[in-house]
Amino acid sequence: MKWLRPVLLLLLTLILVIGLNTKWGDVPPLGKVLNPFRGVWQNAESRVTPKDQRVKLNGRDGEIRIYFNERGVPHIFADSDRDLYFAQGYITARDRLWQMEFQTHAAAGRLSEIVGKQALGYDRNQRRLGMVYGAERRLASIMADSLSAMYIHAYTDGVNAWIKKLRPSKRPVEYKLLNYRPEQWSPLKSALLLMNMSYTLSGFASDFHLSNTRALLGPEFVETFFPPHPEDVDPIIPPGHEWDFEPIIVQAPETTFEPGLLQSSIIREPDHDIGSNSWAVHGDRTASGRPLLADDMHLELNLPSIWYEVQLSAPGVNVYGVSLPGVPMVIVGFNDHLGWGFTNVGSDVMDIYEIRFRDDTLSEYYHDNQWKPVQKRVEEIRVRRGTTVRDTVRYTHHGPVVNDNREDVTMNYIPGGHALRWTAHDPSNEFYMFYHLNRARDYREYSDIISHFRNPAQNFTYADKAGNISIRSNGKFPVRWPGQGHFISDGSDPLYDWQEYIPHDHKPYIKNPARGFVSSANQHPANSAYPYEMGRFFAPYERGARINQFLEEHDIATAETMKRLQLDNKSLHAESVLPALLSLIDQDTLGGTSFYAFNKLDGWNYANDADDVAPTIFHAFWGNLYSSIWRPVFGNDQRHVRLPSRNRTVQLILEEPGSPYLNPSGGGSRTTFAALVTAAFLKAVIDLEKRHGDPGPAWLWGSHQGAVVNHLARIPGFSRKVFTGGGSESVNATRNTNGPSWRMIVSMEDELEAYGIYPGGQSGNPGSVRYDNFLDDWGAGRYYTLRLYSSEEEARAESAYSLIIR
């Protein structure tokens, strides 16, 4: 039996080798991950500043010089456009490859290839929403333009040059933990990233929820609580603006289509925490006599960061700002002549149509008094350690029938038997717009080029060295008859189709207004005097009103003034309603912690500051009260209906105290509502005690909500929480996982003065000091100086290190 012991040891060794190199469920192959020569240890980076490097790469025309500052920001200098975008692709992939590729997998519905069947529902949803279909149509438009085709191929070649050079041991750590490898980049992947941003910023509809609300409570309730133009809104284009055009009128149906109550799906509605602030101040109101531009885009906060900071310089272009990893050009920034910023319009560019099929084969649908064929698209979804799934998606002329009622699609947002019409499915070439925008020299060039932008619709804020400021709601907007698209539409009636689109010169726009500034915080683009309908639901009034209030009060603005406004935590919501609520609380019921909480609210300055407990108490109080008011009306399951807004609820409290919605037990008296308010306040205190214990550091607003910056794949240990103030109703709209993803301020002086910061770092490697080294400064409200070098010599002289590509 001498052979038994060695045989057993050999078998044990084989089991260990196989076990450690196999992925078991969500557990990565530990042998590969912990391998000292190729595993995660190879991803640790030194804190020492890198040395100057020279590399030889095929696929470029000439020498490319890249100078990095101490924060790792590349200043790229090339002698041609092709080399410029080749270098941008190469450097962005060097720092952010995994992020770029993972986001394209998510957009395309390909996560099942990485993580297995648990992502199948998500992937099917992405395919059925037409994400790949829309990206393919965009790519066709890009490739139809020879210039666009040139620079998207150059960028792609740069990304692939890095992938070819990347050794397995140096692959980003996420590839090792998830046990897969990078694939070749393609122009379609860049188009998918634009499609992904379109989904984030415009992939929502209120048709379903509002239709259900109307079916449940009647049209009078809808018109009372969801007015198209709320009284408190301070629109982007100031009231009194004259519209000097003859609007297009489209034919409306004689009768209104009213669908029944639908409860088969949960529709994704607009998330007003995903918005932005942007404004420009004319030189008449600044200390320098030159315009000031400020922009901060609010998105879900992630690590690696959403944006990548860069300067791009070549003959005909010198631009600085942030790029979207995986996409060429600068998306938001400034050049030697002008600057621009975005806020999301939030307009209604997605409609849902009820489809009448001829029979159970779903091969024909009824439209315009005839049966029309359905187009079928077979989506193949590969599943790791599973069988490939083939999913047939049916397309009408409206768009995809996202859920055909035959199978459960777990993440479906569209009711069964309904088609989706969305501007993001239409052919467009935003790359063309960004290419020329980066090179624009004056207002005329700028105004002309932004007419090529389609989706996602954005408010473009502008300032230049010549002294001009402007703002325009820009994108592709259907011309609607009154009420069109507010509810589920009749897919058989051609009058419910999108018949025309708002011409560029008719879109809400103002240049150099008399008040001396322009601003946007995702509120209504214009008031009811504007002759086109752009949607019913926009951001609440508070951020926009606070920005305008602040700018009116500061008539000698500086960059420091703009910083204070971007970091402003004031809550106009609390200021408007809290005094009335406190007057209704029965103070005889208070004691101990509830008495402490009442006094904190009574002495509050209405600022959502990180080191204050009052914001924590107020938001818990308001959440309970809001729920107490509307739960009796809508029931406990509120997923299928739309509830009145925060602002409309405040208006109800202040102006209609006898409303039956505030006094559910009847009687129309303030006494009943006072009891409701008192109960909501006491419950808030109890809830906070259960969560945080006695009042202390855990009650501070920065501890209670703060900012959570999650890793894209939610890998434990790669996320961060930041102690910071703000709130969704504050200009500093930081709230949990959402917040300012890029703060930028530009003073349009002869020598540009610019500042900016984003939450994260230039590197996508969790093992790098540059992965999250901006986060603490971002949370503390600090800014970095942004240097747009006018010459390569300046960049070289101030660089921390360089990379020369030959």
Image (cartoon, helix red, strand yellow):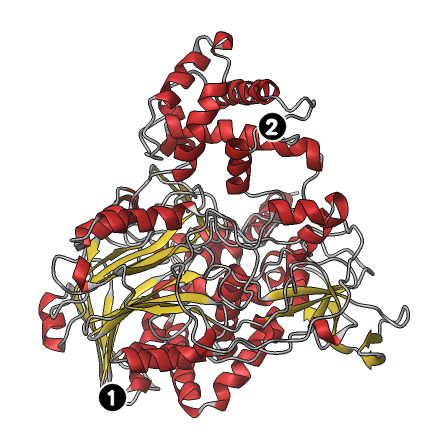
Circle 2: is it few (<14), some (14-19), or many (20+) Cα within 10 Å?
some
Q: Amino acid at mark 1?
A: Gly
Q: Quadrant of residue 490?
A: bottom right
Residue tagged 1:
62
Task: Say above or below: 240 vs 301.
Answer: below
Is 36 left, or right, of 46 in this rendering?
A: right
Q: Residue at 42% across / 12% down in the picture?
A: 595
Q: Amino acid at mark 2?
A: Gly
Question: Cα distance, mark 2 to mark 1?
Answer: 76 Å
Compared with 578, 439 (above or below) is below
Camera-side residue: 330 or 166? 330
Asked whether 104 or 723 is in front, the reply is 723
- On the rendered image, what quadrant is the C terminus found in? bottom left
Q: Estimate the x, y position of residue 237 in percent, counting from the top left.
A: 39, 62
**In x, y percent, where is residue 661?**
64, 32
Percent across and percent down for residue 448 are 37, 82
Helix, strand or loop for disc 1: loop
- Above or below, 705 relative to 399: above
Indicate which label's residue lies in the foreground, 2 or 1: 2
Residue 791 seen in the figure: yes
| Residue 69 visible | no
423 relative position to 336: left or right: right
Residue at 37%, 73% in the rendered image:
162
Q: Earlier in the sequence, mark 2 or mark 1?
A: 1
Relative to the observer, which residue lies in front, 604 or 242? Answer: 242
The single residue placed furthest to the bottom in the displayed view is: 146
Q: Does 309 sit above or below residue 228?
A: below
Toward which corner of the image does residue 244 lie, by quadrant? bottom left
Residue 658, label in figure:
2
